[in-house]
Amino acid sequence: MNHPIQPLVVDSQGTLRFKSNAIVSYLLDNGGIDMNMLACKDFSAEDREQFAQLTGYSLSGFGELSYVRMETYAAAALMAETGASEAQARIAYLEEELASLRNALREPVARLYGIHPGDIPEQP
């Protein structure tokens, strides 16, 4: 199950970033635990993704984190670019992935069944 994607805002420097959570920021600043300590813990990729969002990570920096799944980054980027809802953005990403896989499999499937690749419809 995916955690929800935080809203995106433009900061005073013009950087697109996730809206930070004041409680999370306070705990990081005053709680005696820092990001390096958290990095050593065994948290799921989903929890790490959400935590990065809650700390107000920039969208571009978020996409470079090793634990961020392409699906999450692509959905957040599409939400920022088009104003799509999270559900719409996740669906659009998955539809694009499916079309890409179908197109990539046209040649191997044609060889497997001994048909011409042109007989298999190309996906938009």
Image (cartoon, rainbow, N blue to C red):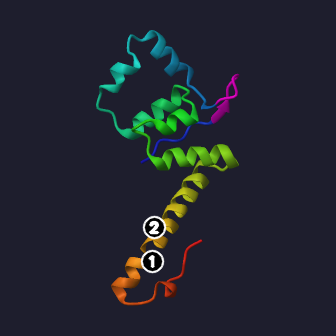
The quarter of the picture where residue 31 lies is: top left
Image location (x, y in percent) of residue 108? 38, 77
- Above or below: residue 29 compared with residue 19: above
Residue located at (60% from left, 71% from top): 124
Residue closer to the observer: 107 or 67: 107
| Magenta span includes 11 | yes
Residue 101: image tag: 2
Span colored in magenta: 8-15
Q: Is residue 17 left or right of residue 23?
A: right
Residue closer to the observer: 63 or 118: 118
Residue 41: image tag: none
- Above or below: residue 97 compared with residue 118: above
Q: Amino acid at mark 2?
A: Leu
Residue located at (42% from left, 48% from top): 1
Task: Please name the residue that numbered disc 1 is placed on.
Answer: 106
Cβ atoms at labels 2 and 1 below 8 Å apart: no
Q: Amino acid at mark 1?
A: Arg
Residue located at (41% from left, 40% from top): 46
